[in-house]
Image (spheres, grey):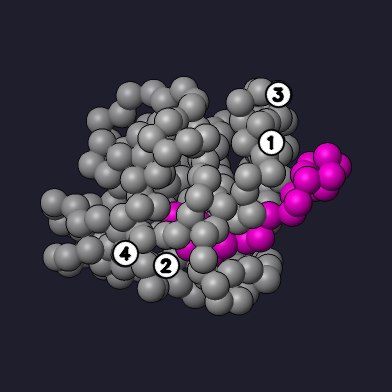
Amino acid sequence: MDEREPGILLGNDSDSNLALFNNITRIRTSRRGIISLAPAAGVLMLGSVACARATSQVEPETRRRIEYYLPDYNERVVAGRNRENPVRVELSSLEYELFSAINGSRSDQSVNSLQLDQVLVILSRMRSSDMALRGYFSHQTPEFGNVFDLLESMSYPRGWAGESLARNNYKVDESVEVAFRDLMASEPHREIILSENYDRLGVGFARSSSGYNFFTMVFAQYAA
């Protein structure tokens, strides 16, 4: 899904009656990534950014399930940005493989490399984890809209933005290769991956209990 002009969305969205995590206000990270989700009233805080308020509370059992679906984070530390601040971002091995594949393809086409963005990584992980947990696959989240709505609610300064999704049930060590192959074989997704309009990227992975691998890639043109 790509935004070429304000208010114009390109891409194929499928219907979904499911939404992002409800009423979560604290995300605690460590070397293993997101490890706890605490419910409370208010807005969803991601460090210095905030998403729109939801309406219902996440029960303890749901929190345990969300943690279960998150990947095992290896220490693949990549230099990146949190808005204008330089940071070091930890990725899982699969996220790092996907991030490298995207920039490798861009380099092969003499397109600028994308800088890893910590805010977009967190958003991408939330999207993948939510789809894996709730069993849907869509650019649209009924309670919060699409990725453009989410970025706006986070007050993320941007120009162009786009989101690509991939899902498969291959073995974990084959999943990125298959996902990226299929993305590049799809002209709309290939255009997003190789677009010169972007300079930031976030990637997020989650695996469902049924064995499906979910990948989310959020692209953005950061506007300081």
- Which disc, if any, is residue 219? none
Mark closer to the chain start, 1 or 3:
1
| Circles 1, 4 touching at the beta carbon (< 8 Å) | no
Q: Judge left or right: residue 122 versus residue 189.
A: left
Amino acid found under the numbered disc labelled 2: Ile
* Residue at x-position 13% and y-position 51%: 55
Which residue is nearer to you in this view: 123 or 10?
A: 10
Amino acid found under the numbered disc labelled 1: Phe
List the residue tagged with mark 1: 180
- Which disc, if any, is residue 185? 3
Q: Secondary structure at mark 4?
A: strand
Q: CA distance from mark 3 to mark 2?
A: 35 Å
Q: Which residue range is magenta in the image? A: 103-123
Residue 144 sits above or below residue 1 on the image: below
Q: CA distance from mark 1 to mark 4?
A: 30 Å
Amino acid found under the numbered disc labelled 3: Ala
- Which disc, if any, is residue 35? 2
Q: Nearer the viewer, mark 3 or mark 4?
A: 4
Q: Is residue 116 magenta?
A: yes
Q: CA distance from mark 3 to mark 4?
A: 35 Å
Residue 157 sits above or below residue 149 on the image: below
* Residue at x-position 52% and y-position 35%: 4
Q: Secondary structure at mark 2?
A: strand
Q: CA distance from mark 1 to mark 3?
A: 8 Å
Q: Is residue 3 visible?
A: yes
Amino acid found under the numbered disc labelled 4: Ala
List the residue tagged with mark 4: 50
* Residue at x-position 35% and y-position 59%: 154
